[in-house]
Structures are given as structure tokens and as C-alpha cells.
Amino acid sequence: MSLRGMIVKGDGATPVEMVPGVLRRTLGRGEEMLLVEFTLEAGSEVPTHRHPHAQVGYVVRGRMRLTVGDETHDLKAGDSYYIPGDVAHAGTVSEDSLVVDVFCPPREDYLEG
């Protein structure tokens, strides 16, 4: 990566199936953050998990139910969220969705693929 930045062409970002119906594509990244696109099929689930990275996301299209800690929220296109590091969270997708997340610091496990 150059000191001037980085360009990732959309067709160069390899999709990775994380769980059935959930694909991620790692897009832009820097030393302090990582941009990831998630394509989620209706009926898919992101199981409860946690990681040390702070996460902020935006629902581009679709609908999903997001549980962060002990709070559950129904989200639709145009909604956004923030998940602090080390807080358990999970999602259930009610209609085909596209979500964009930023992780800080970058998730090393998302840099491959």
C-alpha cells in the first residue's frame, strides 16, 4: 500500500462465504480501518460473536434484526449502527440485504480472500 492511498476495483474484491447466505467482500483498508461489504440472503443468520474491533455499519438495502449486547433493533435501508469492540452481537436477515461495515482497527482475518 502506498502512502498516498489505495484503490480496490469492485471486480477485484473476492467474495467469501462466511456462513450460508452471508458473503463478504473486503474493500478498502488502511492502517487504522477496514471497509467490508456484506451481501446477506433473506433467512440467513450471523451467529452471536464478538471481536476486539469497533464496528460501524450502514444498511444500503434490505431489512435485518440486529442484536447488540442485550438490545435488539429492526433495521432497514438507510439505518446505521455502531458496535463497540468486545460486545456480543448477532443478526437475522428478513429480506435480501446489502450492508457496508467499517472495522477499526482492521480485522486481520478479513484481509485474506
Image (cartoon, rainbow, N blue to C red):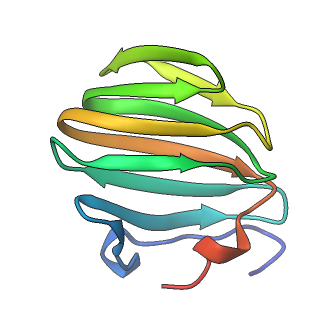
Q: Can residue 78 be seen in this view?
A: no
For the point 45% across and 50% down, the residue is 47
- Residue 6 vs 76, above or below: the answer is below
- Residue 109 vs 91, above or below: the answer is below
Tell me residue 34's x, y (percent).
66, 58
Of residue 102 and residue 10, the one placed in the foreground of this image is 102
Tell me residue 3's x, y (percent).
84, 73
Relative placement, left or right, of 5 versus 57 is right
Tell me residue 24's x, y (percent).
40, 63
For the point 30% across and 22% down, the residue is 77
- Residue 91 vs 103, above or below: the answer is above
Of residue 64 and residue 78, the one placed in the foreground of this image is 64
Of residue 31 and residue 41, the one placed in the foreground of this image is 41
For the point 81% across and 52% down, the residue is 52
Relative placement, left or right, of 3 versus 11 is right
| Picture quadrant where residue 74 is located | top left
Q: Can residue 84 be seen in this view?
A: yes
For the point 62% across and 19% down, the residue is 70
- Residue 82 vs 13, above or below: the answer is above
